[in-house]
Amino acid sequence: MQALYQWQLSGYPWQDVYQQFAAGDDFGKLDRDYFRDGLMQITEASESLDQELRRHGEIPPERLDPVERGILLVGLWELMRRGDVPYRVVINEAVELAKRFGGTDSHKFVNAVLDRASMVHRGPERGAA
């Protein structure tokens, strides 16, 4: 989340953001491969992920708070590319992040967007095949 926030605000390439986090004290606590893959894939696919945000949300990505956009980018990436993570886990974790770091009602928006996206990208898992 923090790395995507920094990437959005700084405009630095994902590799630079990754190196800054790799030098930090908390980096040892992370799943490094997941962090690196996520940061790389999300930033490289940000245009297509933003299209998904437009498709499933009422607010254009460029108008979203960077925290909320970051949460949604991670959630969409996990729904679309990480089938090993159950859709309910993706949505629940995103909602909890939005409650903790987002605006007052951002968790409701995050929940609605990811729920709609999960119907498209995880239909069989949801039983909506």
Image (spheres, rainbow, N blue to C red):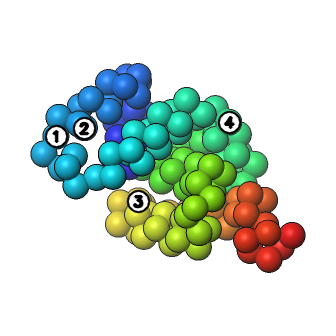
**Of callouts 3 and 1, the N-terminal one:** 1
Quadrant housing the C terminus: bottom right
Residue tagged by mark 3? 102
- Residue found at the very far bottom of the displayed protein: 127
Residue tagged by mark 4? 48
Q: Residues within 10 Å of mark 1 (few under 14, many from 20)?
A: few
Q: Which mark is residue 21?
A: 2
- Give how far apart the Cα atoms at labels 1 and 4 are: 30 Å
**Of callouts 1 and 4, the N-terminal one:** 1
Q: Residue 6's x, y, as percent? A: 34, 36
- Give how far apart the Cα atoms at labels 2 and 4 are: 25 Å
Residue tagged by mark 1? 24
Circles 2, 1 touching at the beta carbon (< 8 Å): yes
Mark 2 belongs to which amino acid?
Answer: Phe
Please name the residue shown 79% across and 69% down the image.
Answer: 124
**Of callouts 2 and 4, the N-terminal one:** 2
Callout 3: SS: loop
Mark 3 belongs to which amino acid?
Answer: Gly
Please name the residue shown 59% across and 69% down the image.
Answer: 86
Callout 1: SS: loop
- Give how far apart the Cα atoms at labels 3 and 1 are: 24 Å
In the rendered image, is residue 1 in sight?
yes
Mark 4 belongs to which amino acid?
Answer: Ser
Q: Residue 93's x, y, as percent? A: 46, 67
Callout 2: SS: helix
The residue lying toward the viewer, choosing from 88 and 54, is 88
Q: Give the total number of marks visible in the rendering.
A: 4
Task: Say whether residue 23 is left or right of residue 8.
Answer: left
Q: Residue 35's x, y, as percent? A: 38, 45
The answer to whether residue 58 is above or below residue 18 is below
